[in-house]
Image (spheres, coloured by chain):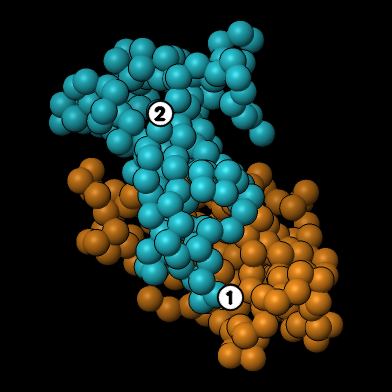
């Protein structure tokens, strides 16, 4: 398992489907794709997640959705491309495109809306946090209206 | 968002999903991923309990597949909370079935989250989508939201 910056326009998290991911039908169970969506989100933000940040802030998921296009099996290498949109203040949207590495077959599309919250007071977020967040999200931001896929 | 009302038909209730440490995040809140995992548990429990022959059906070449899932998070949950899940059908088409699950904290009378997902059925032998198996369609219709039956 590894994560890396694959291009200027997307953050990419790579995952290889393991024996423990699949169910009795020899495919990865749908809930595991959701787990990968959260793992790739964590990977994107890992540089922010020090004790100072975590002692005061948390990411609150507002809503989440995923469409499944094809199944995966043991050994499939999945690239999860993460883009951002609607970045404003402490609110943002993340778009996830799951593809099979190499052949590029579309596995699933995900979308999550988040809000950054102060653990102690709902309306007190330091401006520096917004700047740090934007540094991560702006380089991978896209306009959802101009994408091939509808998330 | 479709919600049940007083005219609703039957609902399937899974009385107890307990929040253990494993389910919590850094700040002690229930991680939203758990709603997706529980969604699969609740729907499978529903089919096992209410649809006779469900397990036998899956021993044949018929596969149940999730094509999309959505979740809205309304309120937080904490370690020790006991969550009740309520399942009902919100759409029944020839090839697909939409199921909604509401997660409630009955102790404080709050809705915590809602998930909606669509299921299709696939014949592994013929490699094609098939109509919803009759036994599943019958039981799903019993649990179909009243508004959908009216309209």
Chain to which the residue tagged by mark 1 belongs: A
Q: Against B27, is A150 above or below?
A: above
Colour for chain B in the figure: cyan
Task: State the mark number for residue B80.
Answer: none
Instruction: State the image coordinates of residue A79 (x, y, percent, origin top left).
Output: 47, 65
Q: Against B37, is B27 above or below?
A: below
In the shown orientation, is residue A44 left or right of residue A84?
Answer: left
Chain the render paints orange: A
Q: Quadrant of residue B58?
A: top left
Q: Quadrant of residue B54?
A: top left
Name the image quarter holding the N terminus of chain B: top right
Q: Against A98, is A141 above or below?
A: below
Task: State the mark number for residue A44.
Answer: 1
Q: Quadrant of residue A94?
A: bottom right
Residue with the mark numbered 2: B12
Instruction: State the image coordinates of residue A7 (x, y, percent, origin top left).
Output: 62, 74
The answer to which of B142 and A16 lies nearer the viewer is: B142
Residue depicted at 62% across the width and 60% down the height: A61
Q: Residues within 10 Å of mark 1 (few under 14, many from 20)?
A: many
Q: Against B14, is A115 above or below?
A: below
Query: Are the residues under marks 2 and 1 on the same chain?
Result: no
As measured in the structure, the alpha-carbon distance from the residue carrying label 2 to the one carrying label 1 is 38 Å
Which of the two discs, 2 and 1, sits closer to the camera? Answer: 2
Name the image quarter holding the C terminus of chain B: top right
In the shown orientation, is residue A24 left or right of residue A81?
Answer: left
Residue depicted at 64% across the width and 74% down the height: A58
């Amino acid at each position: 398992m590894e994560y890396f910056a694959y291009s200027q326009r997307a953050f990419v998290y790579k995952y290889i489907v393991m024996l423990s991911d699949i169910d009795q039908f020899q495919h990865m169970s749908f809930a595991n794709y959701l787990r990968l969506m959260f793992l790739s989100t964590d990977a994107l933000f890992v540089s922010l997640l020090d004790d100072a940040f975590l002692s005061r802030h948390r990411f609150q998921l507002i809503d989440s959705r995923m469409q499944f296009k094809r199944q995966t099996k043991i050994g499939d290498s999945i690239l999860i491309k993460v883009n951002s949109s609607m970045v404003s203040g402490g609110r943002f949207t993340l778009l996830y495109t799951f593809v099979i590495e190499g052949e590029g077959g579309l596995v699933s599309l995900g979308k999550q809306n988040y809000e950054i919250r102060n653990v102690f007071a709902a309306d007190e977020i330091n401006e520096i946090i917004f700047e740090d967040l934007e540094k991560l999200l702006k380089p991978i931001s896209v306009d959802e209206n101009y994408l091939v896929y509808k998330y | 968002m479709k919600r049940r009302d007083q005219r609703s038909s039957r609902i399937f209730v899974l009385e107890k999903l307990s929040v253990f440490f494993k389910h919590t995040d850094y700040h002690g809140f229930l991680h939203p991923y758990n709603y997706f995992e529980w969604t699969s548990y609740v729907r499978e429990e529903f089919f096992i309990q209410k649809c006779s022959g469900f397990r036998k059906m899956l021993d044949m070449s018929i596969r149940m597949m999730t094509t999309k899932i959505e979740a809205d998070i309304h309120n937080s949950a904490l370690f020790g909370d006991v969550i009740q899940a309520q399942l009902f059908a919100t759409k029944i088409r020839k090839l697909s079935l939409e199921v909604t699950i509401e997660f409630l904290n009955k102790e404080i009378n709050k809705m915590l989250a809602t998930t909606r997902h669509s299921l299709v059925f696939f014949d592994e032998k013929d490699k094609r989508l098939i109509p919803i198996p009759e036994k599943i369609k019958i039981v799903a219709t019993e649990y179909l939201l009243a508004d959908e039956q009216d309209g």
